[in-house]
Amino acid sequence: MTTDINTLLTALYVKIDDWLGASSRIGRPPKLTDAELLTLAVAQVLLGVRSEARWLRFVPRHLPGAFPYLPGQSGYNKRLRHALPLLQRAIRALARDTDLWAELVWVVDSTPVECGRSRPTPQRSDLAGWAGYGYCRSHSRWFWGLRLHLICTPAGLPITWALATPKIDERQVLMAILDHDPDLLVDRPGLLIVADKGYVSAELDHYLEERGVRLLRPSYRNRMPRPGEQFLKPIRQLIESVNHTLKGQLDLELHGGRSPEGVGARIAQRILALTAAIWHNRATGQPITRSLIAYDH
């Protein structure tokens, strides 16, 4: 099968439309259906068009006939911001539709999502009170924004994710994620979570042991190494590679969100695009599961 952006969008639209089924919305149906909205959002991210106004001008010329109706910029922005719960459900639906969902090894890490640079921004932004200052060790610099906490399989399939202020400890966020979605741990005997030194915590170890989950992460230099630590480094690099895909190819840090709903929807939009590409690559037997090259032009 030829793998390109049109093939992906067609398969994605059919999948989402079948998954959503008949609409239960009361009143006149929208001219742009939810399935079309999600497909349009995924196409925007994969093709790297960050401006919504430019994107709506881009579609008729480069994807002629793909979307019979396109709203104005303000209408598209409003629909996308209100679609955050739908985006989250779509990510889960696509992830469950792959053989990777049953993986018993997860990789967890967090990465900065910058939301502003000017000094007045923290005082007047709608994100004030949620976003905060944090330190990025990878770039040795401070940033103002959020942290994306991502749990994925070694192949890069997103299992679940959360956005949190940088001031909250990574270990607390991981426990909150699993408490919020306890069904994730059902029917996963022997689940192994691989993390870095930031997840060293007796409280976290006890929390996961109670749920039948093992946590494998490096020990500090003054501690006795745990069994299996010699295999950690290449596995931990996988989550860094996934974060690089989100930032380098899907413009994670150039989301342009200015409100909690806007930031959440745009981050979900990018995670859905990554999930859709992995879902389509697995379904079509592509050799590289997380490759986006066939879909960025």
Image (cartoon, grey):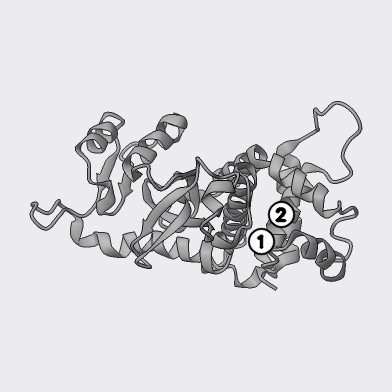
226 to 82, vertically: above or below: below
Give the quarter of the image for residue 260.
Answer: top right
Asked whether residue 204 appears in the rendered view, the answer is yes
Position in image of residue 263 (x %, y %): 60, 49
The quarter of the image holding the N terminus is: bottom right
In this view, the residue in front, 216 or 1, is 216
Label 2 residue SS:
helix
Is disc 2 in contact with disc 1, using a CB cutoff of under 8 Å? Answer: yes
In this view, the residue in front, 248 or 15, is 248
Position in image of residue 58 (x %, y %): 81, 67
Whole-number angstrom distance, CA of label 2 to CA of label 1: 7 Å
Label 1 residue SS:
helix
Q: Please give the residue where the numbered disc 1 appears in the rendered image.
A: 45
Left or right placement of residue 185 versus residue 8 in this view: left
In this view, the residue in front, 129 or 260, is 129
Residue type, numbered disc 1: Val
Please tell me how crowded label 2 is: few (under 14), some (14-19), or many (20+) other residues with Cα within 10 Å: many
Asked whether residue 152 appears in the rendered view, the answer is no
Q: Please give the residue where the numbered disc 2 appears in the rendered image.
A: 41
Left or right placement of residue 287 versus residue 170 in this view: right
Q: Residue at x 19, y 37 (%)?
A: 202
Left or right placement of residue 295 versus residue 208 in this view: right
9 to 171, vertically: above or below: below
Give the quarter of the image for residue 31.
Answer: top right
Position in image of residue 108 (x %, y %): 37, 50
Q: How many marks?
A: 2
Residue type, numbered disc 2: Ala
Q: Residue at x 32, y 60 (%)?
A: 235
In this view, the residue in front, 156 or 264, is 264
